[in-house]
Structures are given as C-alpha cells and as structure tokens.
Image (spheres, rainbow, N blue to C red):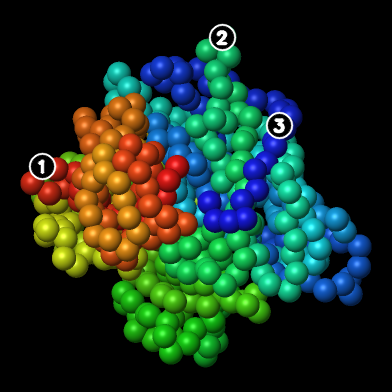
Amino acid sequence: MQSPSLCCRVSADRGRMGKIAALLGAGLLGFLSACGGGGMSSSSQTSSTAATTPVQVNLGDAPADWMLAFSMNISSMSLVGSKGTVNVTSASTPVEMIHRMGTMEPIALVPAQQGTYTGASITIASCNVSYLDPNTKAMVQKTIQGPINATIQFASPATLGSTPLAFNFDLDLENSVTMDNTGNFNLSPMFHISVGPQGTGSANGGFNGGVQQMMGVVSGTSSTSFTMTPLQATNSFTFTVNSATQFLGNISKMSMMGMGMGVLVSGTLQPDGTLLATSVRSRMNSGGMMGGGIVTEVIGQPATELTLVMQNGAGASVMSSYLSQSITVDVASNTEFEIDDDRVDLKSVPFTPLFDASNLYAGQSVLPISESGMKVSGMMGSIAGTITASDIRLQEQGFRGTTDTALTPATAASFVLTLNPQSAFATLTGTNKILVYQQTGTNLENSTAIAAGATLRVHGLLFRNAGQWTLVASTIAAS
C-alpha cells in the first residue's frame, strides 16, 4: 500500500445470509453477487457553503486466488467525517473483485467537505462466488444473501484539505470468509485502508488517483472531454483530453468518439479534482458489447469456441447479473486478436509473445468484443448466453505467489512465481509455476527491493511459450 497507510477495524452485522452448501478443498470458500445500476452520490454534511474537495473512492482485492469470480451488490456506502458523512453511493452498485486482484478501480468520484475522516460504513445486499471444484474441476456458483453491514474504523484519521485524495478499500477476501462446524460459510468483510494524495497518481498508480483501463460506455462528448459510464461504479466519470492523450483501437482522435461507444480509459486525478485521460482505446461501437473474464475452456485448435467467467462488461445489452456467470464466445475465421500492451513492455523479452486462435488457453484473461449483444437462451444453468467475437483482446490479470529471486526496482530480471496449488489457475492448468519477466519499466509498488521467498502480487500479460506459462509484469507488489 502507498503511504500513509491506515489499518482498520471492521465489525459486520449480518441480516439474512444464504447458505453455501459446498466444500472447497481444505476449507476456503464462499461469496458474492451482482445486481444494480449507478447513481451520483452526494454529501450530507453540515454546511452547504463549506469548502469541498473531490475524493476518489476505490475498491481492490487482496486475493483469494481459489475464486474465479467474486461479485457483490453494494447497496450503500459512506465516509464518516468530523463534520458529517459523505454518501459514496446510496443506489445499487455491482462490483466484481477478482479482476481487481492486486490493483484498485474507482467506484466513485465525489465532493467531500474538507476536514478529517475517521471511518466508513458499507452495506452489501448480496454476493456471488464462482469457483472450481478441486475434484471434478466443474465450476460451482454460490450465493450469500444479505444485508451485510460493515462498520470500518480507521486506525488514524485521514485529513482532507484542498488536495484531492484517493480512499482505497482493499477487501481481504482470503480472511473474510469462514466456515462453521456445519459446513456453511460466513462472510465478515475485512478491509485494509490506505489514503493516497493526488500528485503521484499515474496509470500505474491506482492507489493515488490513477485510473487503469476503466471499462465503460461513452455517454457524452465535447471538443475537449468525454463522459463514460462504467457498469461497476456508482456514477459516470468525465475525462478531459489534451495533446498527449493517446487514442487507440478504432479511434485516432477525440472527434471520432461517439455515444454508446465502448472504451477502456487510463488516466490521472489532477490537482483540481478532474480526471485527465492518458489513453483511450475503443473497439466497440454503439449496439455492441464487451465481456472480460477468465477462460475456463477452449474448444478447437485453432479455437472455434471458448467459455469464460465474466468479471467485467460494457454495452447496452450487458446486465450486472452476468457478473460471475459463464458466457460462451464463438470465434469466427475473421475474428481479430490483439494484445493489450498499453501498460506492459513487451520489447526485449526473450520470446515472441503470441496470442491468436492457435495460442489461446484456459487460464488466460481475455476481453471478447461483439458487434451485437448477448444471445440469451433462458439463462439456463450457469451459462448467461453467447456472443460472437469480432475481436478478442488478451488483457492483464493478477496472481499471488512467492518469488524464488530477489527483485530490485528499475531492473530487468526474471523469476519463478509459485502459486498456491489450490488456486483456480492451478486447478485449471495443472501447474502452479509461472515464469515472470520484470522489465525496467515494471512498477514495483513503493519502489523498494523485494527479498527472495517473499509473497507477491503480480499483474501483467500471460502467455504460453514453448509449454511454459510466462507472464510479463506491469506491476509487482509485496503482499
């Protein structure tokens, strides 16, 4: 975590809780669902004339790597301050956590009265978890019904002045689920909190106001800015652009952006509280959809069809209920394949990174894009529906494991990351070893050396090279 770090104390009061009737390996299991929409939040503080400063509220995941997807429906969230509370959301907000493994994503950017903040409260309406049965390797989906109320007390107050802050809520999934003596699983949310000042934010620095490829649909444009609406956030976000903003994919300039277009946006929180887009990528026009997640099955060689567990999505036909569900992706002879290397340096690696219909594997994170919506056939079983991919993009994903080599910032190196043998990746692929390449531009969180044997969170692009799982890292952090 970036400094200053705030530990927290969480108490959770559960209302009705659904039962989880499955047993996972040696005893880890359970969680989360999705439903919802957005809604701009507002401040409910003592004086309407008091000075306010924007705060960015982020959610991330301290990993529970046995899960394939973990989605929850947040019905309310607020920051508690010395002068009142700030409503982050009071409307149903769906969020999926596994694709946030080792990183942070904004769920809101709201004005807050200047002063000190001592805690937060969150109500989770319901939760869904998708995981692989370690024996049959079949996907299992379970639901926990809420409401689940979490009261979070910061270890020390966070002071908001005129500089925008990012409030980071890192949900520790591994330690938030317990199993009772009857085999049922309970959720008691545990959050690690940090607050990052604007100024060091970058596309690689989500803890301090950086935005890393936020997915959404364009809902407004002007000559110097655009507004995009994510599925997994409480409000829309407006980004300004300048001469340094990169436009990628099927757009090359601001004037090509249109309503309903699907975009992936990276950017930074500015001193005045606005968001500046550093890169904007689009491959989906109005009427289409995107649906990112982990591939669980590939049919054909070259691939003609794949199944993935949906962790994110955008488009007119995308519903929050798709999160944590499986979707089928049809691969055609004219489907285009791309590698999303916006944040990953693939130059000078000692292998050729390949991603196409013949180099697509279960265990990889991909973003299929369709020119039309989801074909739904009654939501039977665990399959939400089918899309026909015009484009499939290899996207970054996160892992947790131990390194066999010491790591130094700004140095090119390689190491073997050893995962938990009960992780979803190990269950899918039959191995818990990944060869990781650190580039000179790879972001080592806190810019400090990491000792051999340390537990890491690694984010990057995953390839299969000569039978070896190989990842080129964008971000590495001590866990």
User: Which residue is farthest top?
Assistant: 182
Q: What is the distance, in whole Å, between disc 2 and disc 1 at their CAs?
A: 42 Å
Residue position marked by numbered label 2 in the rendering: 182
User: Can residue 476 be spotted in the picture?
Assistant: yes
Query: SS of the residue at dot 1?
Result: loop
Disc nearer the start of the sequence (2/3): 3
On residue 467, the disc is: 1
Q: Which amino acid does label 1 sit on?
A: Gly
Position of 200 relative to 244 (above/below): above
Residue type at the position of mark 3: Ala
Q: Quadrant of residue 342?
A: bottom left
The span from disc 3 to disc 1 (Cα, nearest Å) is: 45 Å
In the picture, the quarter occupied by the C terminus is: top left
For disc 3, the marked residue is: 12
Among the two numbered marks 3 and 1 on one chain, the one whose residue lies closer to the N terminus:
3
Which x, y percent locates residue 199? Answer: 57, 72
Q: Which residue is drawn at 28% across and 64% down?
A: 440
Left or right of 204? Residue 370 is left
Residue 78 versus residue 381: which sits nearer the camera? 78
Task: Tell me, yes or no, whether the two marked residues, 3 and 1, touch with CB atoms within 8 Å.
Answer: no
Q: How many labels does the image show?
A: 3
